[in-house]
Amino acid sequence: MTVLVAGAGIGGLTLALSLHQAGIPVRVFEQTEQLQPLGVGINVLPHAVRELDEMGLRAALVGLGIETAELAYYTKRGQRIWSEPRGLVAGYRWPQVSVHRGRLQMLLHDAARDRLGPEAIVTGRKVSGFRETADGVTLQLTDRTGAPAGQASGAVLIACDGIHSTIRAHFYPDEGPPIWNGAILWRGVTVAPPFLTGRSMIMAGHEFQKFVCYPIGTEDPAHDGSPRQLINWIAEKKFAPDHDWPREDWNRPGDPADFLPDFESWQFDWLDVPGLIRNARAIYEFPMVDRDPLQDWGAGRVTLLGDAAHPMYPIGSNGASQAILDARVLTARLIKHGLTPDALRAYAAERNPATARIITANRANGPEQVMQLVETRAPDGFEDIDRVITEDERTAHARNYKQIAGFDIDTLNARAPIVPAGAVG
């Protein structure tokens, strides 16, 4: 029988490709009529790039984005706190890739259509409900208007339908909306000259006001021949969780007047923050939200994956990467146990506690806590960073988070494939 997947985001499409590679039939149902390359930048960490590599997508992924070579933390005054090599430069066997989210999704979509056939991805159909039987699951489908649009049957159902998952709500009807921590993110992309190494990801500021940026693509040179890149950036301000913000308009177009004045002085000799904001192609506003970890990800022949299972703060660049890892672990368990409830339980038993640890770490500011420590200890700047925070303390923050998130270099380079090569059809 067939694996049924609700949602053609990064997690759902990766799962479809992974199952097809293993010889397992799969159908994906996506409520959008036509997928388009929407969104802004994301990072795909080395442990997730490894999985895409093992599915034959590494070269295409690298061709779409920038191989990140450096991660650096700065103060609100532009003083460097910490930097470390990333990806191949750090000694990983796989790169870290910064890429436009929509381009990654379309890469996965196009690969899935080519490999599985266009009939495997059904668009314009939302999974509005399901009925479990002794040996399978039957889905109720609706069209974009909410009208009934038929049924589909398969062996198991995997919910990859995002933070507002209908299927998660079936199991947890009283959970309520996502949890807001008081932070608002304004996100945009700007064509600008390269900064620092040209392959750097930077974070400046502290917990209550922060700016993140990194290149996600190469653009045509300027008129004078100087190089240009597509720079992804995030400006963040944190309010009290009960702050009167128009949350009914979350994910709306952003207004620079709401945050640019707070970043006007952030003009460093290595980066023009207000210039990036002013010259953005478009700006979008998002709340920083997550959900509490769940005791169970489903029941019987139904389970959750990606943001439907474990939405987390965008700290540490883990959202898309963890969805990709979910897909590969689930594939491995389906190979071992068949298309059965036992396979889904084994998958959740491994991935639920692993992602819960990341949710908890991100709520404590993850590796970025080092920025807040410096702000607290030296709000007016410093002459010697080692007198503010020792190198050992900075190194420990970075090392501990990699271990929590599953991409410490030695473990990743040495471990066996999640999906054994001999099990792939």
Image (cartoon, rainbow, N blue to C red):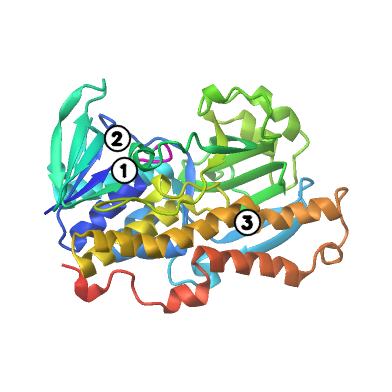
Where is residue 350? Give x, y as percent. 40, 65
Where is residue 278? Give x, y as percent. 63, 29
Amino acid at pointer 3: Gly
Q: Alpha-carbon distance for marks 2 and 3?
A: 32 Å
Q: Which label sits on residue 106?
A: 1
Question: Which of the two residues, 392 or 366, is positioned nearer the viewer here?
Answer: 366
Please tell me how many numbered marks the rendered image carries: 3
**Residue depicted at 26% across the width and 31% down the height:** 34
Q: Earlier in the sequence, mark 2 or mark 1?
A: 2
Query: Does the image show residue 292?
Result: yes
Q: Which residues are magenta?
A: 160-164
Amino acid at pointer 2: Leu
Q: Which label sits on residue 35?
A: 2
Contact check, label 2 and label 1, Cβ < 8 Å: yes
Q: Quadrant of the N terminus?
A: bottom left
Q: Is residue 380 above or below residue 345?
A: above
Read off the residue under disc 3: 366
**Residue 135 sits inside the magenta stretch:** no
